[in-house]
Image (cartoon, rainbow, N blue to C red):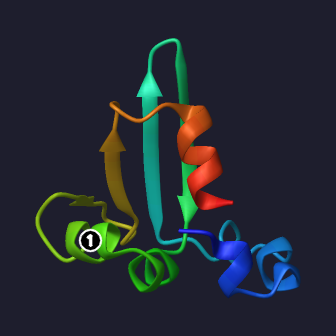
Amino acid sequence: MDLQRRYDPKILETGILSDHFDIEISVGEEPNTKTFHLNSSILQHQSNYFYRALSTHWIKVENNNIKKFQKPNISVEVFDIIVK
């Protein structure tokens, strides 16, 4: 999933993946963890994996409608590359 190839980089830089997020994906294992604030619609559109994962009960939804997704088996470095 290369978001920069499919979306204008200016859109990505303006914060569509951080300012208007509806999902928090926590990756990595202690002590190297990071939580990414992302837009689930873009993830679902760009990735069959996230389309399936976010359409099922794999995730927990908080009271503020923010979805929480835990992926300890993916390193911070790898996930950072995936979402860029």
The residue lying at 11 percent from left, 64 percent from top is 57
* Structural crowding at the residue carrying mark 1, measured as other residues with C-alpha within 10 Å and reported as few (<14), some (14–19) or many (≥20): some
Q: Which element carries disc 1, helix, strand or loop?
A: loop
Q: Which residue does the numbered mark 1 point to in the structure image?
A: 54
Residue nearest the viewer, comparing 26 with 53: 53
Q: Is residue 74 above or below residue 68?
A: above
The residue lying at 71 percent from left, 79 percent from top is 5
- Quadrant in the picture for the C terminus: bottom right
Residue nearest the viewer, comparing 6 with 55: 6
User: Hey, which quadrant is residue 17 in on the image?
Assistant: bottom right
Residue nearest the viewer, comparing 17 with 44: 44
Give x and y (percent) for residue 46: 47, 80
Q: Is residue 43 above or below residue 18?
A: below
Give x and y (percent) for residue 48: 31, 75
Give x and y (percent) for residue 45: 43, 86
Give x and y (percent) for residue 15: 77, 73
Left or right: 3 in relation to 11: left
Kind of residue at badge 1: Leu
Q: Is residue 36 above or below residue 62?
A: above
Q: Residue furthest left?
A: 57
Query: Could you tell me how many numbered marks the image carries?
Result: 1
The residue lying at 70 percent from left, 71 percent from top is 19
Q: Is residue 64 above or below residue 31?
A: below
Left or right: 64 in relation to 55: right
Left or right: 7 in relation to 40: right
